[in-house]
């Protein structure tokens, strides 16, 4: 869709905002500051009062989830004696077994970047509500962080695979548009080269699992920095991007974009409306299939079949005859295909 839409920027717990309602924000703008909790420390609470560990709840003046500053009272007995927090941090849990409190010290202050362009419409708990101008595309799958960068077309054709050799230093900070899939090697190289994100038609499950396993190992080793997002436009497996959509994305090459992988969203700013899709296609219209074995493939609906045909599930369904780009004819349930229409028709 284009025009404007509302987006929620998720804020990590403990974020102190640096922007206000009504402000215009850029994708690279810092919207808040936070201090990340580190490994918790154990603070004795009942022992200084010579109380039993089971008396912990009776003397606590803070609860799990509270933020405390160094020197703040965390417990007080009937005689007015207090136990103070030795650090500034987040109260993680109370331990009545040994009468202690777990407190996670806060690390250095870190910026929280919104990765979205627009006007702040309001505040919610742990979220900024932003009115985003431009085009919003919703995919069928995605993963990773919110990122932003210039859109960069990395393949020549929508059915091409994104190869590791095609990812070089020119892609650093960009959101790459691949084709039908990307190998785990290509995804890993893109991450290492500082690519912000990748848009694909599809991806093989095994490749995605291998890539995520590599990222977990690097994160555990402390060698992984920056953010990275993946968006799938058509489906899972090797699925080419619809040629009309790929052509439209090619026209947006070099424009600023925001990708929110976990929410399966891509925002493109200063862009015209993309090809749209609608259900109940008519004979003669270009269509795209949404179920295997033709998932992600496009063709033309050449006829509506008078009799119901069995879908892959075995359930009879109203169907149409589709001629795919390679000339193959196949009956498909109408519920499994959508018409691809030009912007002027939508």
Image: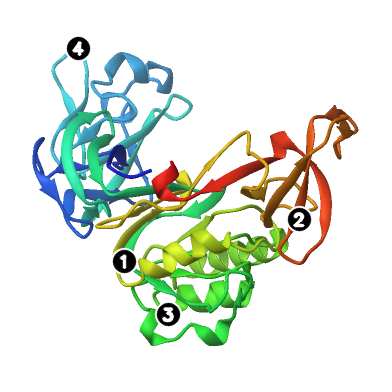
Q: CA distance from mark 1 to mark 4?
A: 58 Å
Residue on which the image places disc 4: 78
Query: Circles 2 and 3: CB distance less than 8 Å?
Result: no
Query: Circles 2 and 4: CB distance less than 8 Å?
Result: no
Q: CA distance from mark 1 to mark 2?
A: 38 Å
Q: Position of residue 275 (x, y in %)?
A: 46, 52
The one of 332 and 51 positioned closer to us in this rendering: 332
Q: Residues within 10 Å of mark 1 (few under 14, many from 20)?
A: many
Q: CA distance from mark 3 to mark 4?
A: 60 Å
Q: Is residue 58 above or below residue 139?
A: above
Q: Is residue 50 above or below residue 178?
A: above
In which quadrant will I find the C terminus?
top left
The tag earlier along the polypeptide, 3 or 4, is 4
Query: Circles 1 and 3: CB distance less than 8 Å?
Result: no
Residue on which the image places disc 2: 323
Residue on which the image places disc 1: 149
């Amino acid at each position: 869709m284009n025009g404007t839409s509302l987006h929620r920027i998720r804020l990590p717990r403990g974020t102190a905002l640096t922007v206000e309602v009504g402000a215009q924000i850029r994708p690279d703008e810092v919207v808040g500051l936070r201090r990340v909790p580190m490994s918790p420390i154990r603070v004795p609470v009942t022992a200084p009062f010579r109380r039993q560990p089971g008396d912990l709840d009776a003397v606590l003046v803070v609860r799990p989830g509270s933020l405390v500053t160094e020197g703040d009272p965390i417990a007080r007995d009937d005689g007015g004696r207090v136990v103070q927090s030795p650090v500034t941090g987040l109260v993680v849990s109370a331990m009545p077994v040994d009468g202690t409190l777990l407190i996670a010290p806060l690390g250095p202050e870190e910026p929280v970047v919104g990765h979205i362009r627009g006007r702040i419409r309001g505040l919610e708990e742990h979220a900024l509500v932003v009115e985003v101008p431009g085009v919003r595309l919703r995919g069928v799958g995605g993963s990773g962080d919110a990122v932003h960068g210039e859109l960069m077309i990395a393949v020549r054709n929508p059915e091409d695979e994104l190869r590791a050799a095609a990812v070089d230093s020119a892609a650093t900070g960009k959101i790459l548009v691949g084709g039908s899939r990307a190998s785990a090697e290509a995804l890993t190289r893109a991450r290492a080269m500082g690519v912000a994100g990748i848009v694909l038609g599809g991806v093989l499950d095994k490749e995605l699992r291998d890539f995520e396993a590599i990222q977990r190992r690097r994160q555990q080793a402390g060698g992984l920095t920056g953010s990275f997002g993946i968006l799938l436009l058509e489906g899972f497996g090797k699925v080419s991007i619809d040629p009309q959509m790929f052509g439209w994305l090619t026209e947006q090459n070099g424009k600023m974009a925001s990708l929110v992988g976990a929410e399966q969203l891509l925002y493109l700013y200063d862009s015209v409306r993309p090809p749209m899709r609608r259900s109940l296609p008519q004979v003669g219209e270009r269509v795209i299939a949404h179920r295997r074995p033709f998932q992600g493939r496009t063709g033309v609906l050449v006829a509506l079949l008078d009799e119901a045909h069995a879908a892959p599930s075995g359930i009879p369904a109203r169907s149409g005859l589709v001629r795919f780009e390679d000339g193959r004819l196949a009956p498909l349930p109408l519920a499994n295909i959508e018409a691809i229409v030009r912007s002027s028709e939508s």
